[in-house]
Image (cartoon, rainbow, N blue to C red):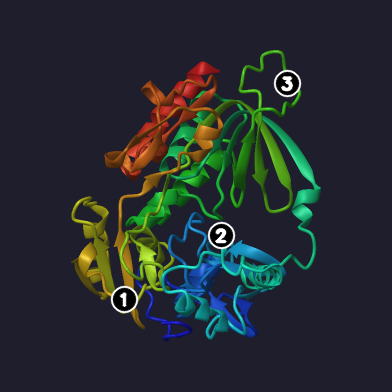
Amino acid sequence: MAGSRPPPLDPTPALARSASSSFAFEGEVHAATAGDSLAEALWAAGIWQLGRSPKYHRPRGAFCFSGSCGTCLLRVNGRPNVRACMEPVSAALRCERQNAFPAADVDLLRAADWLFPHGMDHHHLMTGTRVGNALFVKLVREVGGTGVVPDEPDPRFGATEILQVDVCVVGAGPAGLSSAAAVAEGQAGRRVLLLDQRSGSGGSWRSEAGGRARAEAAERRLRALGVDVALASTVFGYFPEDHLPASSPAFDGPPGVLAVLRPQHVTLVSARRFVLATGSYEQNLAFPGNDRPGIVAARACGRLLLDRGIVPARRVTLVMDPAAPWDYGERLRATLDAAGVTTDTVSLAQAPAPRKHHALAIVARPAPAFELPRQFGVEVQHDPARGGFFAAVGPEGRTSVPGVFVAGDACGYVGPEYAEAHGRAVGRCVGSSL
């Protein structure tokens, strides 16, 4: 698998792909379809290995295609550790793999995995002598970590914008889109801001049949209602100790600010109401070799095919955990079969290694993205049946934190249909509270 470049596969009828864009990857120019992320374009070109792990230099590739797993980091235009699945393709991009010597395809540092078959305890290795320890520490600093410092400082952190809005919705998936729409429809004149780290809205809809068109229609509706839809905007923290001056005496929202990295600058957001529709994360299953390139999350596999028109592989094996079944696996298999992909389903104990033209799709129930609600002080509970840790909410998404609501999968994985309905109910409640 390492370094293999199988020829691009035929596109599906869902989206006719065309070489309407290009980008430079390690000195070669590759064609792409407008709207592709780097990870999607590289997968379509048959480049599945995107880097090496920090410690043992094992091959790594894109897994979630949604910005949450960190296995697709590339150096892009001199910036290290850029998430390839979050970076839209453009002719101005120069990207290469990192954390390997002399190259990612043939990495001599991979020997660390063979030299220490039972694990490397770098905290105690070569600590017998001061000289030996000093040499070892220097070596570890050279070969460990990911990437090297940027060529230039990131200009986005040199400019700050301050926004004060009535409602800030975080997450443009089914719950966030429907929540923002419910507020805007019921509260004309209110300033509503919708944030999402991806360059396209829709979230989990993009992994479902017809989801692309559904997401685009919902986004057009929001813009027509006057909602400020800010895509490619990554929320990186809530800071309750920071206070912006209230826009009016009627300001009754949480005191802190939400920090957002946008394409041109950092934005600090203060809002009377926050709706946290952060969705859910893709999960892997535990089996030998589960971190190899060519292994992707089930929803990522569906998104490649249904949203981007990329046939994931000639053969796809769906790996399921019999102890935790998830109905998306059957829908995905039917979709792949209809696209002419050879599929089979195996249990966790039978998972094979990925091979050239043969990908593995991990069918594991997604986990709620509870971290941002937790930063706001929202109570978090745990239930394996709901995906793990989740934000505890009352009726219509209310939390114990005044002015903070949570909608959709962050309250426990429920899937896109229920998330949309829940988001709409939360949005109505938020609107009535203003």
In-image side of 319 versus 368 (left or right): left
Give the mark nearest the N terminus, 1 or 3.
Answer: 3
Q: CA distance from mark 1 to mark 3?
A: 57 Å
For label 3, the SS is: loop
Residue at 70 percent of width and 37 percent of height: 268
Residue 4 percent across, percent down from the top left: 45, 85
Can you tell which mark lies on residue 29? none
Please tell me whether mark 2 or mark 1 is closer to you in this view.
1
Residue highlighted by disc 1: 353
Q: Amino acid at mark 2?
A: Met
Position of residue 195 relative to residue 140, above or below, is above
> Neighbour class for label 1 at 10 Å: few (<14), some, many (≥20)?
some
Please report the residue visible at 62 percent of the width from the left and 35 percent of the height from the top. 238
Marks 1 and 3: CB-CB under 8 Å? Answer: no
Residue hosting label 2: 86
- Residue beneath disc 3: 246
Helix, strand or loop at disc 2? helix
Q: Quadrant of residue 329?
A: bottom left
Of 351 and 7, the residue lying toward us: 351
Q: Residue furthest top?
A: 249
Amino acid found under the numbered disc labelled 3: Ala
Q: Residues within 10 Å of mark 2 (few under 14, many from 20)?
A: many
